[in-house]
Image (cartoon, rainbow, N blue to C red):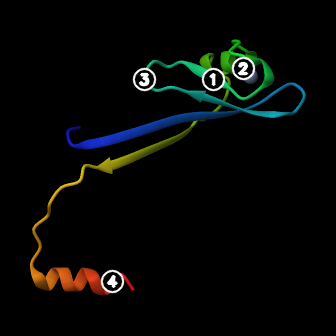
Amino acid sequence: MQGQTITRSIRYHVTGSTGDAYVVTVDPRDTRTACSCPAGSFGKDCKHQRAVRNGEAGRPIVRCTTRPAPRTVSVSPAMRDFAAALEL
Ligand SMILES: [Zn+2]
């Protein structure tokens, strides 16, 4: 979409065999994964990341942030007063 910056982050909460919860982050651009566990923080391909790739990690937590590009909007003075009154 033009004129907009879309930031997407995909995260999975994966519970390890010892009951610890780790966060696997997926880069939506190249689908590279990263994990918050000790092995993952050393850049290793851990079982949590494999679980995500194999579809065993359940539903992802997807955050999609859309920031509209700054633009000039022409508003009537009455509309501007109305908008200003809303910001109490
Ligand atoms: Zn891991």
| Percent of width and height locating residue 76 | 9, 78
Q: Is residue 50 or residue 69 the one in the foreground? A: 69
| Label at residue 63 | none
Label 4 sits on a secondary structure element that is helix
Give the residue at x 67% y 27%. 57
Residue type for callout 3:
Arg
Residue type for callout 2:
Gly
| Label at residue 29 | 3
Q: Earlier in the sequence, mark 3 or mark 4?
A: 3
| Label at residue 86 | 4
Q: Residues within 10 Å of mark 3 (few under 14, many from 20)?
A: few
Cα separation, mark 1 vs mark 3, equals 13 Å
Cα separation, mark 1 vs mark 2, equals 6 Å
Give the residue at x 30% y 87%. 85
Q: Is residue 55 visible?
A: no
Cα separation, mark 3 vs mark 4, equals 39 Å
**Is the residue marked 2 within 8 Å of ligand 1, measured from its CB?**
yes
Q: Which residue is mark 2?
A: 40
| Percent of width and height locating residue 68 | 28, 51
In the depicted structure, whether residue 61 falls above or below residue 74: above
Q: Are marks 1 and 2 in contact (CB under 8 Å)?
A: yes
Q: Which residue is mark 1?
A: 34
Cα separation, mark 2 vs mark 4, equals 48 Å
